[in-house]
Image (tube, helix red, strand yellow):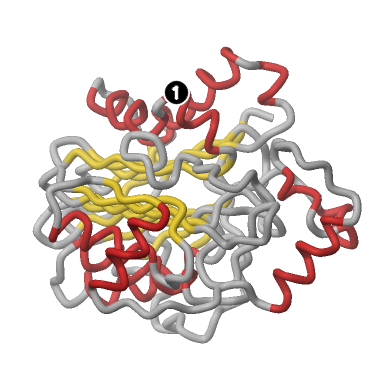
Amino acid sequence: MINRRKFIKTGTASAALLAVGGSSVSGTVLSRAGSPIVISTWDFGIPANQEAWKVLSAGGRALDAVEKGVRIPEGNPLIQTVGYGGLPDRDGHVTLDACIMDESGNCGSVAGIEYIKHPISVARLVMERTPHVMLVGEGALQFALENGFQKENLLTQESEKAWKEWLKTAKYEPVMNIENRLYDKAAPRQLPGNQYNHDTIGMLALDASGNLSGACTTSGMAYKLHGRVGDSPIIGAGLYVDNEVGGATSTGVGEEVIRNVGSFLVVELMRQGYSPEAACKEAVMRIIRKKPETAKKIQVGFLALNKKGEYGAYAIQKGFSYAVCNARRSDLLIDGKSHY
């Protein structure tokens, strides 16, 4: 059974949407057949989904929905792991990663881009206006500025303060899952990757035409080495969509997702007949089997949506939640199952 948690509404939730949009069937959740649906990682996926739903409910394209949806956390300075307000790398640079993929297999990505609040929209222009898939660093910034994006300071006072506090005791070496130590006062509530320290938003949508698209965006691991790129902008790792089968996205420590080409793996497992949840679980277990001791200390979660509108998730650790929005309910938050 699905564990549904009450989420404090963000003010954009519709009070008229009362019924839960699915039921549990052998580890898979079913959306109403033929209906649009959008799902995304973490608690802040709720307002992101609601923005995406404005597109889907009007008969719009899934690609437009996921781009508009993830722009919500990208632009929220209170979310310190995505976009504006993201925690910097060890040298104080806020570097962002994002990718987007449509129903035809077209995709675009940016990595290590600075000064641009909405990297997901730059990623879409890479897909639509260049022959390339990925632009990085200064080249990505140059492309964004040439296409009308404005250069902005993304390091907020709150994130700068947190970074300077970290510098007092930090060692200049990569520390896995350093995000989990950000909030000392919240330590009793800490779980790897839970709502107090999570990172990426990944979003998947199925539109009224039966087409799938996905988006993934993040500011990456807090206090990472300058130049570090995780799984989020890498097609097949942080995101993958195959319109014949379904889509998948990931969250958590990107290095382990990259090593297992995690989102592609989830989609291929669904192609073989796995339910979304079962496919996510197998991808998680592959990480655990390869590096059992490492897996005990980190969080990785996968979220998947198939062509039928079935969805599911699975994570290494407790604390991974995902949001669902369909014609019946706009504010459903589900506790993902986990190995530990």
Quadrant of the rendered image containing residue 147: bottom left
Using the image as rendered, state which of residue 103 and residue 231 is in the foreground: 231
Quadrant of the rendered image containing residue 24: top left
Residue 84 against residue 102 in the figure, above or below: below
Residue visible at 52% across and 27% down in the picture? 284
Q: Is residue 288 visible?
A: yes
Q: Is residue 7 visible?
A: no
Percent coordinates x, y for residue 56 in the rendering? 22, 70
Residue 337 against residue 110 in the figure, above or below: above
Using the image as rendered, state which of residue 14 and residue 38 is in the foreground: 38
Quadrant of the rendered image containing residue 329: bottom left
Amino acid type indicated by mark 1: Asn
Q: Which residue is mark 1?
A: 260
Residue 199 against residue 296 in the figure, above or below: below
Residue visible at 57% across and 62% down in the picture? 94
Q: Is residue 201 left or right of residue 210?
A: right
Percent coordinates x, y for residue 236 in the rendering? 33, 34
Percent coordinates x, y for residue 124 in the rendering? 24, 60
Residue 34 against residue 277 in the figure, above or below: below
Residue visible at 40% across and 66% down in the picture? 70
Percent coordinates x, y for residue 48 in the rendering? 42, 69
